[in-house]
Image (cartoon, grey):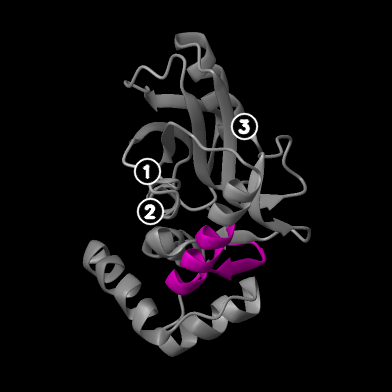
Amino acid sequence: MASAPMRCELITWNRVYALSRSLAFKIRDAGFMPDIIVAIGRGGYVPARILADYLDMMALTSMKIEHYTRGAEKEPEARVKYPLSEDVTSMRVLVVDDVSDSGDTFQVALAHIRERFQPAAIKTAALHHKVVSTYRPDFFAQLIIKWRWIIYPWAVVEDLTALIGGFAECPAGAEAVAERLRQDHDLRVPLATIRDVLAPMADKRD
């Protein structure tokens, strides 16, 4: 990925939990009680588990859709990598992902489920919904009006590796890398996290 100036936002674990909690309350307040939650892997795994806790649900499964390969690198189109194996016919289904960015992932997921099964109802939920997305989830915790690439804590090493690897010349030392990330991407990252990323990158160069 070329590290062209691109605004990014690093989401903390505490923020993820707060957003998931808010999302759960919105779902409950809307009166939608799913029979099963389907997490879209990989980004939807953690939010779906927190929602299952708040909604007092044991029925949690997943499917995997590939769209982004590493960081913001994007495949030509989203595709189902691992299909949904659970039969959700006649169930009220809640499909969960971390973000609705382009909208393609949700659209592919819904088409896949409806082609294979006949759910009684199907709703979608995400932590973040970007206004540029072609698909609007039924529930979301935060609306993103000014686009930025969102880095979730479960993908921080992956995304930072892509950003740093895109530098024409990598600065020497964690402090210099931190300053470059701030300048290029408006991104403030703890030095300990940057060191975690730089260590395996150095091993690969050796």
- Is residue 53 part of the magenta span, yes or no? no
The local secondary structure at tag 3 comes to: helix
Give the vertical position of 26 relative to 88 (above or below).
Answer: below
Q: Which residue is mark 2?
A: 53
Task: Tell me the kind of residue under disc 1.
Answer: Met
- Is residue 17 part of the magenta span, yes or no? yes
For the record, the magenta segment spans: 3-22
Q: Residue at x 52, y 70 (%)?
A: 15
Q: Residue at x 67, y 39 (%)?
A: 138
Q: Can the viewer see residue 173 in this picture?
A: no
Q: Position of residue 49 (x, y in %)?
A: 37, 50
Query: Which-is-in-front pick, marks 1 and 3?
Result: 1
Give the vertical position of 201 relative to 96 (above or below).
Answer: below
Give the vertical position of 21 relative to 172 (above or below).
Answer: above
Query: Looking at this view, is 136 or 153 the one in front?
Result: 136
Q: Gap between marks 1 and 3, in whole Å?
A: 27 Å
Q: Position of residue 75 (x, y in %)?
A: 53, 34
Mark 2 neighbour class, 10 Å CA radius: few under 14, some 14 to 19, many 20 or more: few
Give the vertical position of 14 relative to 154 (above or below).
Answer: below
